[in-house]
Image (cartoon, rainbow, N blue to C red):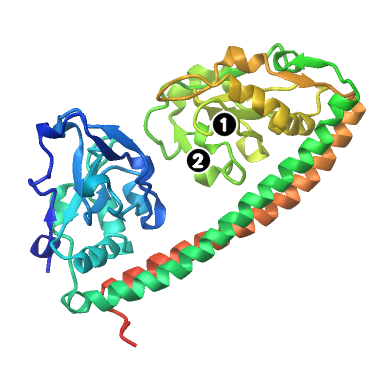
């Protein structure tokens, strides 16, 4: 069987008309359709009467993203709790509609299966960054007749099993968050000594090498190039992310025009867009790499301890300043000029080293714990998808 035999893809009947203009509607952009089939229906929009700007969604529809990399992340969800049983979604999703709620529940799982994701990814068309799957691919997705005959039992089984796995993922995610909060509290206790001891504040720019001032990077890095120069983007500035295997690469021709923002030993990277305020010390594996315009390179003076500065920039005192400097309606960020003016409380050099290395050791221990938890979450998600794939393909008997 094919999906087109049991459901409609982007059906023409939307349930909307121009008479609905001015009404409050549930709005579903891509960033409200999350991993593990969850989505957030709390965002609303006033309908302007133009259905061509959106994808019309009805209660019980299955929403499938069209565009990379959202599609590859398996962000498929069943529409529920919509205002008036209707919603306006981004135009970058497909709607799969059936007449039966059980059919929709089964199809939601079928469209999260590993073979669907891998085959869809292989079918992408378009240029880098704008690749999409086609509606023809979606309509022709294979459905196991054996699994379809047992769709109610399979949907019930997967509802129960994925709920258990999701609960475990939720616990691990909470552990990861609590670890981060505890480290932040520890850092603040150490760094708030500056207020008690009346350390003088200096702007961040004065703590940096004047020959290598705070600088953003490549404006248009182009497509990912296999043998190109490693590139740190705003979303990469986070614990465990700054490793070559997880980063994009830009062509050497493009990178050659941005030698001023190349990364060196002791540098820090600060996300000025995409995870604004995240800051990390550049590892040795990324010396010689470059950054995008969403990242600022910070090169401390020789007498400024880089580990101390890393934790100073992560402190609540500095992060609250950075948050107050964020501008932009759609794309939020911090201007380089504002970043340079961040006020940093300066301890004596010997105290910097002591604080920096003490917090560095604690941070490393927390990072190891966090990586273990993150790996457990990844394994749970892999288990979740493997279970879904086996069930919807009819390869396992879930009746017992």
Observer-nearest of 142 and 28? 28
Residue 79: x %, y % from top left: 27, 53
Q: Position of residue 50 (x, y in %)?
A: 15, 30
How many numbered markers are drawn?
Answer: 2
- Tell which circle, 1 or 2, labels the residue nearer the N-terminal end: 2
**Image height of 65 relative to 392, above or below:** above
Q: Nearer the viewer, residue 138 or 345?
A: 345
**Residue at left 10%, top 60%?**
4
Residue 312 occupies quadrant: top right
Residue at 71% from the left image edge and 17% from the top image edge: 204
Q: Position of residue 143 (x, y in %)?
A: 18, 68
Mark 1 sits on what residue? Answer: 289
Report the residue marked by disc 2. 247
Which of discs 1 and 2 lies nearer the camera? The answer is 2
Instruction: Report helix, strand or loop for mark 2.
Output: loop
Quadrant of the image for the N terminus? bottom left
251 lies left or right of 298: left
Vertical placement of 138 versus 55: above or below? below
Pick the residue in front: 78 or 331. 78
Q: State whether residue 128 appears in this view.
A: no
Quarter holding the C terminus is bottom left
| Mark 1, secondary structure of its residue | loop
Q: CA distance from mark 1 to mark 2?
A: 10 Å
Which residue is pictured at 26% across the width and 57% down the height? 119
User: Which label number is shown at residue 375?
Assistant: none
- The answer to whether the residue labelled 1 contacts the one labelled 2, judged by CB atoms less than 8 Å apart, is yes
Q: Name the residue at 38% across, 54% down.
A: 38
Q: Is residue 364 above or below residue 269?
A: below
Residue 314 location, x and y as percent?
69, 33
């Amino acid at each position: 069987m094919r999906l087109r035999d049991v459901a409609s893809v982007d059906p023409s009947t939307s349930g909307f008309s121009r008479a609905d203009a001015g009404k409050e509607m549930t709005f579903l952009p891509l960033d409200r359709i999350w991993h593990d089939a969850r989505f957030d229906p709390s965002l609303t929009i006033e309908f302007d009467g133009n259905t061509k700007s959106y994808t019309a969604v009805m209660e019980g529809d299955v929403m499938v993203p069209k565009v990379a990399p959202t599609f590859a992340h398996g962000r498929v969800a069943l529409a529920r709790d919509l205002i008036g049983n209707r919603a306006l979604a981004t135009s970058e999703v497909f709607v799969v509609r059936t007449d039966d709620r059980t059919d929709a529940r089964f199809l939601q799982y079928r469209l999260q299966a590993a073979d669907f994701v891998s085959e869809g990814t292989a079918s992408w068309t378009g240029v880098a960054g704008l690749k999409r799957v086609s509606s023809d691919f979606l309509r022709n997705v294979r459905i196991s007749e054996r699994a379809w005959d047992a769709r109610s039992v399979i949907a019930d089984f997967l509802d129960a099993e994925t709920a258990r796995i999701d609960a475990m993922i939720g616990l691990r995610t909470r552990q990861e968050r609590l670890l981060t909060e505890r480290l932040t509290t520890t850092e603040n206790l150490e760094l708030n000594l500056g207020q008690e001891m009346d350390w003088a504040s200096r702007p961040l720019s004065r703590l940096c090498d004047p020959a290598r001032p705070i600088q953003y990077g490549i404006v248009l890095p182009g497509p990912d190039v296999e043998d190109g120069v490693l590139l740190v983007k705003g979303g990469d500035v986070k614990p465990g992310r700054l490793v070559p295997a997880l980063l994009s690469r830009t062509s050497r021709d493009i990178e050659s025009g941005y030698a001023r923002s190349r990364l060196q030993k002791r540098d820090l990277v600060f996300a000025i867009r995409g995870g604004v305020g995240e800051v990390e010390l550049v590892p040795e594996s990324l010396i010689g790499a470059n950054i995008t315009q969403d990242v600022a390179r910070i090169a401390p003076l020789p007498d400024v301890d880089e580990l101390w500065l890393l934790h100073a920039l992560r402190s609540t005192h500095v992060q609250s300043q950075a948050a107050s400097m964020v501008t932009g309606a759609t794309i939020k960020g911090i201007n380089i000029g504002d970043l340079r003016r961040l006020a940093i409380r300066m301890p004596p050099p010997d105290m910097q080293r002591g604080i920096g290395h003490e917090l560095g050791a604690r941070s490393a221990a927390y990072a190891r714990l966090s990586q273990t938890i993150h790996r457990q979450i990844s394994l749970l998600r892999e288990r979740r998808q493997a279970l879904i794939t086996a069930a919807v393909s009819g390869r396992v008997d879930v009746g017992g």
